[in-house]
Image (cartoon, grey):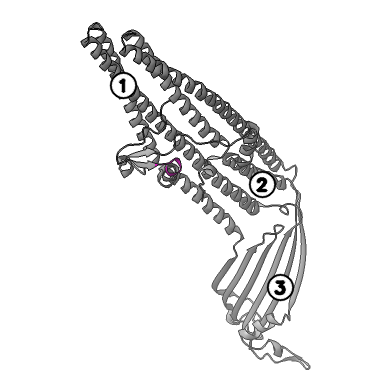
Amino acid sequence: MICPLCFVLLAGAEPLSVREAITLALERNPEIVAERASQEAATGALFAAQGAFDPVLGLRFGRRNATTPASSILQGANGRLDERTSTQETSFRQRLPWLGMSLLSQLETNRVSTSNPFTSLNPYYATLWRDTLLVPLWRGRRTDEARTTLKVRRANHRAAGHDFEARVLDLASRVEASYWTWVAALEGEAAAADAVRYAREALASTERLVNAGEQADSELAGARGQLRRGEEQAAQASGAAREAEQQLKSWLARDGRDAVWERVWRPVETKLALEAQSASELTARALAKRPDLAAALARLDAEKANSQLAEEGRKPAVNLSFSRTVQGLAGRSVPQGALFPGFTLDAPPQLVGGAGRAFDQLLRNRYATLEASLTVELPWRNREAEGRYRQQVAQERRVEAQTRQLEVQAALEVRRAWASYAAAQARISAASDAESASRERLESELRLYREGQSNNLSLNVRQSERTVSLQALVEARRAANLASAELRRAAALTLETFSITVE
């Protein structure tokens, strides 16, 4: 049997394990960098959706100068009425996360001066403080546009995280498969070198026998031809090993100028044990742990949220509104005199003052108005909302069916990989026995040849058998390693096996 580690004694080569190769790839591969950017974009989208529940503070400042014609002396002197109004308004708007409620608070101050001679306060300050709470009773109670968008963005954020994990898992699996291909190529190179060694021994024996006169000169041609074929196969195997090494480095390189291309490595492992009881056990794990399935379920949650919003749109709008309004009024008193004894046109004393007096009235809740209103909107037939709902339900069913199909595909991948792994293990056992037998036959044939009891043709046949059996053993090991790598990927075991955490 070929020694699995006979090729690791490369002078100056750095040891490289499967885990180290995967770690380097995850740190440097541009594919992962790009996928991480997609995850960051999903995080930004979620952050933006949360902004719908941010409070909004509004400020408004206004100035109005109005001059209107007055047909009566009671309106204005000299046939005109002049009014100067300064307005300051502060508003606070907050969408609440419960039951679709929203709150609006407004504080408004107006300073008005007028040329109307019959105004008791001039200038005067009119203040107003209004709080309004809007409560949906039917449409928009379970969900609305803002809450649905937040649910969808959260689901998409989860899906993006699982997509990133799936990409990491996929890259790790490809790196592992490339590693095992490299290992197999090095084993093939060692097997070819072993065949060349036997061919050289046979040529040396042939030369001795020819010189001793025990073999014809024509036997030398056959022995040299066998050596040349072996050397040609060794050169091909060496080229395949270098190509496999470069393919592995392509997963680990940051770009085309990365120093990783010039590094010389030797593999640490030639195989990796797979701990699994049955295909059913691995299938159950795959359905529970595979990130692509988790991403699909997160997207299905997003579609369900959209379906709920579409269903809300079919309902009538019934909204209840509560409002509380407090007003204040104060100004500089303008004496008007008595209209008749006991009745004066002067402003009441509690209204005489500046802006502070008007605000004090707001705080004391002296002039308050409470109001409640119920608004009902019944759209006729509502075909637009009904059509959107049917369209969304169909979309949800489609995504759900795709998710189920992904589960079927995951189960199929696990069971196929399990079958391939079991078959490869059986191949290794058979190929190992065949390799041992061919080696023993070749060594026996060499002994007979050295003693002159065999011929070159029989020796060439044994050498060819030995080469074929070695190649079969190398290919069986490669198939087993690749099958185990695929089985770990299909069952979402790769990252756990190599203790890799996705952040």
Which is more toward the observer, 385 or 77? 385
361 within the magenta span: no
Which is more toward the observer, 277 or 43? 277
Residue range (magenta): 16-20
Which of the two discs, 3 and 1, labels the residue nearer the N terminus?
1
Question: In the rendered image of this protein, does residue 208 appear above or below residue 491?
Answer: above
Q: Is residue 184 left or right of residue 217?
A: right
- In terms of secondary structure, what is the magenta stretch mainly? helix
Q: Is residue 57 left or right of residue 104?
A: left
Question: In the rendered image of this protein, does residue 36 appear above or below residue 52?
Answer: above
| 10 Å crowding of disc 2: few (<14), some (14-19), many (20+) | many
Which of the two discs, 2 and 1, labels the residue nearer the N terminus?
1
Label placed on residue 305:
2
Residue 321 spot, x, y in % from top left: 74, 63
Question: For the point 74% across and 47% down, which residue is it?
Answer: 379
Q: Which residue is mark 1?
A: 196
| Residue 21: quarter of image | top left
Distance, label 3 to label 1, CA atoms, is 100 Å
Question: For the point 50% across and 29% down, which residue is it?
Answer: 480
